[in-house]
């Protein structure tokens, strides 16, 4: 029998003996003239006392009394209430003891008559029984408090039975953070180990000095690493970590007080620590958070991006970052083992995962069939892309990149520049890490490019080609979700966007960038000042961003010169000439599209249209052909082109859309 099972068995014996003693006392109170009742009480008390003679055994009732500061009278009253739940005969005995069939329940009055040395100090709200809500008082109308029925709290009854689990009333607000198998196998990287040691030292000092432990602020945006670090600190100190979303914390005074009181009680009954996710802080929950922190003396972690001003409790601020590139590379190598190949270096340089994510992804990869190992396919790379999308999907719109180099029609100079951008992204790990440039540079480790040119000249397609070549996700930034009229909100949104993008390895595509990266203006009022602050923040963030950011604009002159100076590449997308337009027409229709024998790319090249407009014409012509049940013929293409010209409000002659063949003229 295990020590725990042995203790449970002895604790059950103690409870049974305690209930027997309560029954004997009730019977004696109901029949005070019966000498046999006194003998039964002495016998039951002796049996109860005998079970506690062994110093190695402390029953749950005694643990509770020592922890919550209960007097002997309060412990006996709690045992009386527990007997009501543990034995069906108790109710009848209570009624007999009170000589009233209508009172088959415990009360303060019954306890005062039943036990020696009654303690009237047990009744006030600040006394342990009521302060810690160990008993529930069922007081009806004008009934005196002493006569009201008492019942034991369910959580406390379970504790007396040796079942020490978190109170169910806290379950809607809290949930544990158990380590899954991958987390248990994952060793904390050295950077997080140092942080865990740093925090543990402060907690140990607080324990030695018998002072309230400091509030631990985990700064940064990597929530999973914070959970892993907090879990490791709690493991070292034997604490069970609970997680609380601040937005779920009740804000009504009564509900908040009940929550805090129950949480305080749980911290006394169990070795607990709390991790609070401070997301969406506002006036209402700031007050609730402050009250919780002031009244809780246990270990508390705050998951925050930045330090929260105004908190009175002593704080320990710790910056949490994901493992370094070198640490992630080692984690990948350890997780993939013989199937690693060159994946550890490639993955660590492109993505930013914490140890738990790396072990999860690697475990899935090593379980693939032998004929499809990570070294022989891109399944692991694709899995990493999918995992990294989680945060970005909420902040930007992903573009399904399908374009390839052979579809991109540009002059050689522009194509070469795009190739240089692609190659720099692919080889940045060797230059920055292996060749030591990261140690020399503290900014500008990312790659930024400006694509400028008229609408429809291929800027978006070029971004798709780069993303497709690098096998990376491409995200178009929606300015409406970034720019806010409220002061400070735009910077907050941009910070979240850039931080998430760096972790995901994604390519950012700022379309119509001049709307966001415009020139700073002369400060004439507060609006100009805050607008310039936003632009200054963008300048700094673009320079420190370590991924690939592409800015697209129709008006290069509208961009702030400081942005242009920080750009590594500027690619001008010219309006296509006649030869480029002919090549675009030859490539715009998929191979599966039935083209008429009269298709003439040179004739179509005479139409002064950009690549985007040509794509629109081709698509509209295909729909016309599908509707008519024919191939895509020149008359249909020219008809669609005429509609495109009208849409653009561009002047043209009727002869521009006419077509002559052996059968006549089609317009």
Image (spheres, rainbow, N blue to C red):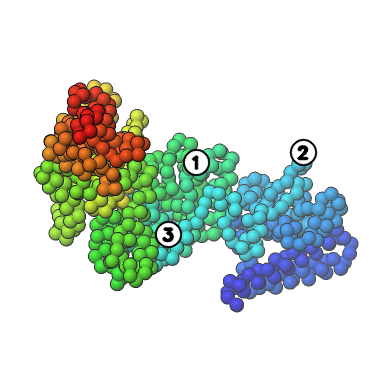
Residue 632, image quadrant: top left
For mark 1, what is the residue?
A: 288
Residue at 61% over, 63% down: 163
- Nearer the viewer's eye, disc 1 or disc 2? 1
Residue at 70% over, 66% down: 15
x, y percentage for residue 542?
Answer: 22, 42
**Above or below — where is 34 with respect to 579?**
below
Q: Quadrant of the C terminus?
A: top left
Give the label on residue 142, or none: 2
Secondary structure under badge 3? helix
**Above or below — where is 654 with respect to 278?**
above
Furthest-right residue in this view: 33
Question: Is residue 23 among the parts visible in the rendering?
Answer: yes
Sequence-first disc among 1 and 2: 2
x, y percentage for residue 258?
Answer: 58, 45
Q: Are marks 1 and 3 in contact (CB under 8 Å)?
A: no
């Amino acid at each position: 029998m295990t020590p725990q099972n042995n203790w449970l068995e002895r604790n059950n014996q103690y409870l049974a003996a305690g209930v027997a003693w309560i029954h004997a006392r009730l019977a004696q109170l109901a029949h005070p003239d019966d000498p046999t009742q006194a003998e039964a009480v002495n016998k039951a008390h002796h049996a109860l006392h005998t079970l506690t003679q062994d110093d190695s055994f402390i029953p749950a009732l005694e643990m509770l009394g020592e922890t919550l500061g209960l007097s002997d009278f309060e412990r006996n009253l709690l045992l009386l209430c527990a007997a009501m739940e543990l034995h069906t005969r108790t109710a009848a005995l209570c009624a007999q003891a009170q000589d009233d069939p209508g009172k088959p329940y415990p009360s303060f009055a019954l306890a005062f008559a039943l036990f020696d040395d009654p303690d009237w100090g047990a009744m006030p709200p600040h006394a342990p029984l009521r302060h810690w809500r160990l008993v529930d008082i069922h007081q009806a109308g004008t009934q005196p408090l002493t006569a009201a029925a008492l019942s034991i709290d369910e959580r406390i009854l379970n504790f007396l039975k040796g079942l020490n689990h978190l109170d169910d009333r806290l379950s809607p607000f809290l949930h544990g953070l158990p380590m899954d198998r991958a987390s248990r196998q994952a060793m904390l990287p050295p950077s997080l180990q140092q942080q865990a040691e740093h925090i543990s030292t402060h907690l140990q000092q607080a324990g030695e000095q018998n002072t309230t432990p400091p509030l631990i602020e985990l700064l940064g945006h990597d929530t999973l690493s914070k959970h892993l670090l907090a879990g490791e600190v709690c493991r070292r100190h034997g604490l069970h970590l609970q997680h609380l979303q601040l937005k779920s914390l009740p804000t009504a005074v009564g509900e908040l007080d009940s929550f805090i009181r129950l949480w305080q009680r749980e911290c006394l009954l169990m070795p607990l620590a709390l991790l609070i996710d401070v997301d969406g802080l506002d006036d209402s929950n700031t007050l609730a958070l402050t009250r919780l922190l002031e009244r809780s003396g246990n270990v508390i972690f705050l998951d925050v991006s930045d330090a929260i001003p105004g908190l009175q409790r002593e704080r320990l601020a710790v910056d949490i970052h994901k493992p370094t590139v070198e640490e992630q590379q080692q984690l990948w190598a350890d997780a993939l083992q013989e199937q690693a190949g060159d994946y550890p270096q490639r993955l660590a340089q492109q993505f930013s995962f914490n140890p738990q994510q790396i072990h999860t992804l690697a475990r899935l990869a090593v379980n693939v069939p032998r004929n499809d190992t990570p070294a022989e396919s891109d399944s692991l790379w694709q899995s990493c892309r999918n995992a990294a999308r989680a945060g970005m999907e909420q902040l930007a719109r992903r573009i399904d990149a399908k374009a390839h180099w052979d579809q991109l029609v540009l002059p050689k100079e522009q194509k070469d520049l795009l190739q240089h951008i692609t190659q720099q992204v692919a080889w940045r790990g060797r230059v920055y890490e292996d060749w030591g440039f990261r140690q020399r540079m503290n900014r500008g480790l990312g790659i930024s490019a400006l694509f400028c040119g008229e609408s429809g000249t291929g800027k978006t397609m070029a971004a798709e080609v780069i993303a497709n070549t690098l096998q990376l996700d491409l995200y178009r930034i929606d300015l409406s979700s970034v720019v806010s009229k409220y002061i400070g909100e735009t910077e907050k949104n941009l910070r979240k966007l850039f931080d998430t993008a760096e972790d995901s390895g994604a390519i950012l595509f700022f379309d119509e960038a001049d709307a966001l990266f415009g020139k700073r203006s002369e400060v004439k009022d507060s609006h100009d000042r805050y607008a310039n602050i936003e632009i200054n923040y963008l300048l700094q963030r673009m320079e420190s961003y370590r991924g690939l950011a592409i800015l697209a604009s129709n008006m290069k002159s509208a961009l702030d010169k400081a942005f242009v100076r920080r750009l590594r590449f500027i690619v001008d997308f010219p309006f296509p000439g006649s030869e480029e337009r002919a090549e675009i027409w030859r490539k715009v229709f998929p191979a599966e599209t039935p083209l008429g024998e009269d298709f003439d790319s040179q004739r179509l090249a005479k139409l002064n249209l950009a690549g985007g407009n040509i794509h629109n014409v081709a698509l509209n012509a295909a729909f016309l052909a599908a509707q008519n049940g024919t191939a895509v013929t020149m008359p249909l293409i020219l008809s669609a082109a005429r509609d495109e010209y009208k849409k653009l409000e561009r002047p043209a002659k009727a002869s521009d859309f006419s077509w002559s063949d052996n059968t006549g003229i089609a317009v």
